[in-house]
Image: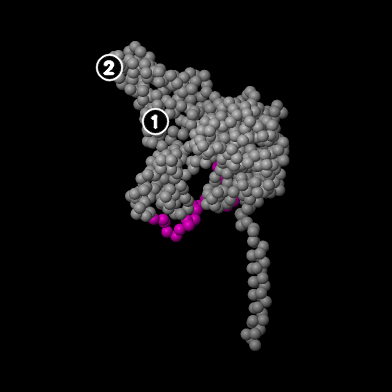
Amino acid sequence: MARQRIVRRVVPYLAVFVFSIVVNAGQTVGQSKPTPSVDFGKLANDYFAPLIADKSANAVAVVFTNRERVTFSKTYGPVDFDRSIWRAASVSKALTAIAVMRLVEEGTVDLDGDVNRYLKTFKIPATFQQPITLRQLLEHRSGLDDRFIGDGFRSGEQPPMRLLMQQVLPARVYAPSDVEFYSNYGYGLIGAVLEDVTGERFEDYMSANVLRPLKMNRSTFAQPLPQDLVSLVAPGKWWYQHAAPAGGVATTGADIAAFIIATLNEDAGVISNSSFKVMTTPKSTNAGLVHRLGYWTGRDHGQQLIGASGDSGSFHSVIAAVPEHDLGVAVLVSGNGSGLAWGFYTRFLDAQFGTTSPQTPRHARLLQPKPADRESSSRFTGLYRTVRYPHHELSKTFIILDLTRVTADADGALRFRGARWIQNGPLQFEKEDGSETVSFKEDSGGRIQFLGDTDEKIGWYQSGYANIPFYFIFTIFFGVASWRARGVLRWLSLLALLHSLGWLSAALIRGPENLILGLPLLLKGILSIGTAMPLLALAAIYVAWRNRTILAVATAAVLACYVPFVFYWNLRV
């Protein structure tokens, strides 16, 4: 009887307990994991107040939202959240991509159709057999070169994109889809397509069909700014960008907040849910942050993010939406470097989701190479350089040391990017802890050409490790020859010395980042010597043939070697 009384008392409690588990389980299905409560005001103050105090930042606007409204906003410095105008730079690309998807939904364009079908003002040369598509342009996979020098301007008229691109269309340097080559002028080409298919100027179409529907009512792609906005510009180094679809938008803190809310709502005011998914779904579930169509997307701090970011002059911006947590953040900064905006982005993710930790390995034990890997690993070793640079401008020198060295261990494993990589396919390698994979790519002759989507294999003689010593050897020799040589050889050596010292000095005095506004007259004059360098070398060879002295022969040989150096690094006009 006592046992029965105990059972009668316990069973109801068990029933309630089980019922509560079932109900709570049902309530949590489809819900995101709860996140810690973060004091956004304190987070922003602790980060930005010292930057404003020590003048690392001129001004800041920071905002947090959910899908419906702004939950926190604040400005630092002499700016107003609703009225001050900021350069949002490459955030423009996400807006341009939305415009393209709108036209796709209308049936006006096809993401995978040859863009020459839509261009009326000019056509893209058939450098490669494969045509360029809008999808490739949006994903930076068109292979189209980029421009930096002269892309910016402070005053004057912005031509229509179709006419601008007709005048300055960069060369095609890679076959479409071979690599991810981040190209602002690829987006400029998208602007030309939009103008040719809509019959409107790019900035007018964007205003009526993207910005206003997204409630970005004070934002504009107009360059120069309308007069009523000029006085509202946030303090900082400001210039316009000819490739407006890539970086031309000017906006306010309030409008950026509206854009985050729109992103959390999948841009429903302009495009459909399915189009948004096409734009923002990562190709790999294990990918980090990667470029998709306009937006970047991927996982960071264990969260799936959708965002956009940009840099122009002293203006830096980062926006990020965390759809699973109904949370968005944006920061607009005018100051010394993009690290200010990205630093706050990281600080926010650390506070909200915990500090960054290594990805959980998929394997209980570290991967081990196979005996056959020892034989094949050597074909992958060498130097690789980013493909992201203007291939036909002096600005190519900016990436002279942006290199990845791939080496092989005795057991056949590769070492690069601070890790060991084990071969798990003919051209594929997996990080030793199983957390990441990367694929190499071959050229038509079976030689390794690319590491992943962003780095190209180069010879030792093409690297900065070789070319920086080459530069000093040339310069020292021209200095000595200018002192010791006589007659024509002295003048030839002086011109070469003027070129080798002059282009670097003039570029540094101007400020490499300021070359976006064009080449100053002095630098143009010095680079014109580079254009004439083959003639100087021929003249030196003629003198050496006539005189046949050691100094004459050496001068001719060094000048002849200097010619490919000048042309490889585009040290000419």
- Residue 513 seen anywhere in this rendered image of the structure: yes
Callout count: 2
Q: Which mark is residue 468?
A: 1
**Place of residue 516 in the rendered image (x, y in percent of width and height, measured from the top left):** 55, 28
Quadrant for residue 263, please give it.
top right
Numbered range of the magenta stretch: 342-368
Q: Residue at x 54, y 50 (%)?
A: 284
Q: Position of residue 194 (x, y in %)?
A: 65, 35
Q: Can you say which quadrant of the picture contains the N terminus?
A: bottom right
Furthest residue in direction top, as rendered: 487
Whole-percent x and y of residue 572? 46, 23
* Residue 353 part of the magenta segment: yes
**Residue extending furthest left?**
549
Q: In front here: 556 or 296?
A: 556
The answer for how far apart the CA atoms under marks 1 and 2 are is: 29 Å
Q: Is residue 273 above or below residue 555?
A: below
Q: Would residue 500 be found to the left or right of residue 33 on screen?
A: left
Up/down of 365 relative to 256, above or below: below
Labels 1, 2: front one: 2
| Residue named by callout 2 | 549
10 Å crowding of disc 2: few (<14), some (14-19), many (20+): few
